Image (cartoon, rainbow, N blue to C red):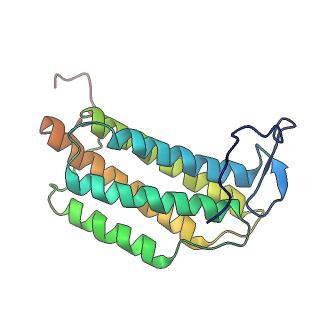
Amino acid sequence: MGNRLSKIYTRTGDDGTTGLGDGTRVPKDGERVEAYGTVDELNSAIGVLLAIPGVPAEVSASLTEVQHELFDMGGELCIPGHHVITAEHASRLEVALDGFNDSLPPLKEFILPGGGPAAAACHLARTIARRAERRVLTLSRVESVSPEVVKYLNRLSDLLFVLARVLARHETGTEVLWRHDRSKPA
């Protein structure tokens, strides 16, 4: 296990830089920091979702495992050349996605983010997952990044979309559908 912090502030970042896991100092707004920072934000958004009372146990269990994997991913992105996320991680998400999607009716309309507190929080996490994927892709244009990280984030955003549907139906019995022609009464 790495070093544990006994003192939270170090003053080493006061100049606008931060240390990577290998000790390299980089700008706090650099591509690598943006990538792992957005993964951290995604993990926090999932934490908010899991703090909402009434989230079904199977959703909670799946997303708790995702939180651990996102923490691992943050470490991978923080240490250049370090690899933790594998094809098996994305495959696990696909199995979960298929399992949750099996109980849902076919999608015939676009869905608006909402449907209850947990569903709305899940939609927010989904959009942060998409941003994390974009930040990792930006990083991959200037530094080496495992393609498995991008694949994982892509599958995770799909899983979060399906879970938002599951949660909306769990919370309110339905989903919020986008109405293309809003001039007609609902």
Residue 80 lies left or right of residue 52; in this view the side is right
Residue 115 lies left or right of residue 124; in this view the side is left
Location of the C terminus by quadrant is top left
Q: Quadrant of residue 20?
A: bottom right
- Please report the residue visible at 36 percent of the width from the left and 55 percent of the height from the top: 64
Q: Quadrant of residue 94?
A: bottom left
Q: Residue furthest right?
A: 15
157 vs 3, nearest the viewer: 3
Please say whether residue 182 is visible from this viewpoint. Answer: yes
Location of the N terminus by quadrant is bottom right
Please say whether residue 113 is visible from this viewpoint. Answer: no
Q: Position of residue 155 (x, y in %)?
A: 42, 63
135 vs 183, nearest the viewer: 135
Residue 94 lies left or right of residue 183; in this view the side is right
Q: Is residue 35 above or below residue 85?
A: above
Q: Quadrant of residue 178?
A: top left
- Please report the residue visible at 56 percent of the width from the left and 51 percent of the height from the top: 39
Q: Residue furthest left?
A: 173
Q: Is residue 122 above or below residue 1?
A: above
Q: Is residue 78 above or below residue 172?
A: below
Q: Position of residue 40 (x, y in %)?
A: 56, 48
Q: How many marks?
A: 0
Q: Position of residue 175 (x, y in %)?
A: 20, 39
Q: Residue furthest front?
A: 6
- Please report the residue visible at 85 percent of the width from the left and 53 percent of the height from the top: 25
Q: Position of residue 89 (x, y in %)?
A: 44, 72
